Image (tube, grey):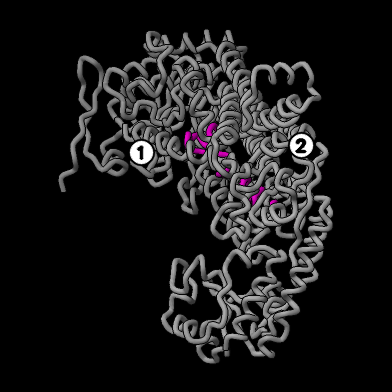
Amino acid sequence: MRRPSLILGLSLALALVLAASIMLGEVSLSPAQYLAGFQQPGSAVGEILWSLRAPRAVAAAVVGAALGLSGAVMQGLLRNPLAEPGILGVSAGGGLGAAVAIAAGLAFSPEVVETAALAGALLAGGAVAVAAARFREPETLILFGVALSAFAGALTALVFNLSPSPVSNTEILSWLMGSVANRDWLDIARGLVPMALGAGLCAYAARALLMMTLGEETAVMSGLPMGRLRAAAVAGAALLTGAAVALAGIVGFVGLAAPHLVRAAVKGDPARILVPSALAGAILVVLADLIGRVVPTEVELKLGVITALFGAPLFALVAWRAARSWRA
Amino acid sequence: MSAALEIHGAVASVGGRRVLNGVSLSANAGEVVGVLGANGAGKTTLLRAALGLVPLDAGVARLAGDDVRRLSVAERAHRAGYLPQERRVAWSLPAWRIAALGAVDLPDVKARATALQALDRVGLSPLAERGVLEMSGGERARVLVARLLATRAPLLVADEPVAGLDPAAQLLICEVLRREAAVGAAVILTVHDLTTAVRYCDRLVVLEGGAVAAEGAPRDALTPAVLARAFGVSGEWLETPAGPLISLETIRS
Amino acid sequence: MSLDQCADQYVLALAPRASIVGVSFRAGDPDSYLASAARGLPRRRATSEAILAAAPQVVVSYWGGDPLLFRTLARRGVSVVQIDEASDFAGVRANVRKVAAALGQTAGGEALVARLDGQLSSARGAWSGRPALYLTSAGYTAGQGTLVHAMLGGAGLSDAAPSPGFGRVSVERLLLDPPMALVLGFFDRYGLSQQNWGPGRHGLIQQIARTRAIGRLPGSLLGCPAWFAGDAVQSLGAAARRR
């Protein structure tokens, strides 16, 4: 499939899904109400459409795009279709930052929790970026990320253990499950800054990802400054993931699934997969959020829970297919 | 004119183990140099050290007269094309795209043209759009050789370019490399199969235990003594209508 | 409108029925104090869209919702009143008055406070300072600084908990030095021997509970810092008179 038409097609699909996300929700509206909502954005119905559902849908899209792009970059860098942004330990670092902030009693200010999550994520991301510049083997980087993830997870468990009250534990758990509820335009704008930076770094590193198809040594010998490009790729992925976690909590499997869905259409090209993967990620998360809002459970389904429920079987499928091709 | 590749007194260790114990060799434009040796003799390390991918404990490696340590990454890529032993391709990109990775210095249209040309030379034109992971191992290996050709570098360094290929593919690759040398490139490769080495290389360098055991034209380098010591086989040179051939047997103790 | 089961009780007790536009999904559960009053009232999710669609003026919450939700509601002129943790009856009174004021039902609030005070005065000193240990099925006790501690004191019991706050009961200590009396908490929901890995699984603990329990407090009275804590004090006081 030619790339411009792929990107066009995905963009169209995203626009459709966003429209659906604004039109559909917890409260079913009559056609007359929709009309009123369009004509008078300030009315109650208009409020629901434009200042409740719209920013939420856009936040979902932005988070999904960041995770999809980050996942594609990680898979290209590590030459492994099973890699996920969380593998770097960045998500776990973000979760730890938020947990500490909430346990410290700062939950009343969402901006503080958001900043703490971003700080935690970037700290972890920085460590991995340094490791990426030094260690050439993907396996080493993966192990480092897994260790970092485990360590952050252990510290988060410690926060739970020592937390002052069961209420704060519940708040932490709720945050960790991921959500884009009640995110407004300002939250999104704050998230876009590190995301844009991250996306820029990933674009810069794209040619390294393509070269990595043939392995580290060939890439080095092709004249690319691999240490710098690797660090840029990791830093970019860390910024994207960190910003996504800060905005929405931990939303898993999107970074794994989005690149997988578009890989065949780009014939596996790790540089050309970046933009389609971001678009696919956006579509996935907007859909997941829509499901969470519309399914009539007593408690609203959390975004991270929905992506995990759909993502884990998908992960199993991808792993099974990958194992089959390794055996071949 | 300086040699395309020169290495003097190279001493190198890998993983704490001394692999090269003072190796010197050179490769000039227009010749095909084959590096031979038993497994673990240091062939791959030698090539990697010559390109600056393995740091030398002692000695110096030069590409076109300049110390490889002083070359920028881009300049080094300009002077040498490298085909490593590891042939794992991560993604099933079309063959032409893989081959075009050798020509990243060219604009896209020219890179594609160069890639298609290279694929043609290795006999893979009909498979130009096929995903490389949907090909046989032999076809894939040829795509990687095409990528090497697409670099158009004056020095081609290939580590085991024909290992695991069927006889027709082996001969084809060797012909291609010979032709590169004939139009002015310096080609240095490692090879296991002695018959191939004898037939296609102008000069052979035999490594044993990290040092050069013999060097020279195939007939001169592969004496029975060298064959016994470096490879543990007993060999005999035969004159045939097709040229000199070497016949090997295990050593009877 | 109320966002969780504790807030439900406040809203059901204080707000005129016609003005209640929503209660939580747990309002009708068996452990909801005013479960019967919740019958027929619309259940709402604690999400901004559901809340705004119900168009309440005031939203009451104990643990329901989250800061981002409150920010969204506040921006749209919905006032959110939060029930605070209460460590004694003064805290309970403050909560009742706070919510009552927000709902414009100060008189109703004072009536609940008066009811509480009446229960407290009738039960005062009932047990004459007898030591008792509060024990939940999960093996927790409540010491100084907790509402349960205040409840025990309200009925004239002396809290035998070793440390302030909610702490785990040392099973060994319990066996070595069994308290004179036990007040069991949440035992309507969970029996003593049961689903979780608390000390209640142990046969010896069960025996102590059987012989020494002087009161069993249902979960509906314990999960929420509200005026019906007085019911607990009253029942403990009545148990003293029966002896």
Q: Provide residue B23's location: percent of width, then percent of height.
A: 48, 41
Q: In the displayed structure, would residue B18 be above or below residue C231? A: above
Instruction: Please name whichever residue, A208 or C198, is drawn nearer the observer in this view of the structure.
Output: C198
Instruction: Please name whichever residue, B160 or C207, is drawn nearer the observer in this view of the structure.
Output: C207
Both labels 2 and 1 in a single chain = no
On the picture, is A327 further left or further right than C41?
A: left
Q: From the image, tell me which residue sits under label 1.
A: B37
Residue occupying the point 66% across, 48% down: A94
Q: Provide residue A72's location: percent of width, then percent of height.
A: 56, 31
Q: In the displayed structure, would residue C2 be above or below residue A220? A: below
- Label 1: few (<14), some (14–19) or many (≥20) C-alpha neighbours in 10 Å: many
Placement of the C terminus of chain C among the 4 image quadrants = bottom right
Q: From the image, tell me which residue sits under label 2.
A: A187
On the picture, is A140 further left or further right than A182?
A: left
What secondary structure is marked by label 2? helix
Q: Is residue B73 visible?
A: no
Point out the stretch of residues depicted in magenta: A75-98
Q: Is residue B177 visible?
A: yes
Q: Provide residue B96's location: percent of width, then percent of height.
A: 47, 14
Is residue A89 in the magenta section? yes
In the rendered structure, which amino acid carries the disc numbered 2?
Asp
* Res C82 → quadrant: bottom right
CB within 8 Å, label 2 to label 1 = no
In the rendered structure, which amino acid carries the disc numbered 1?
Gly
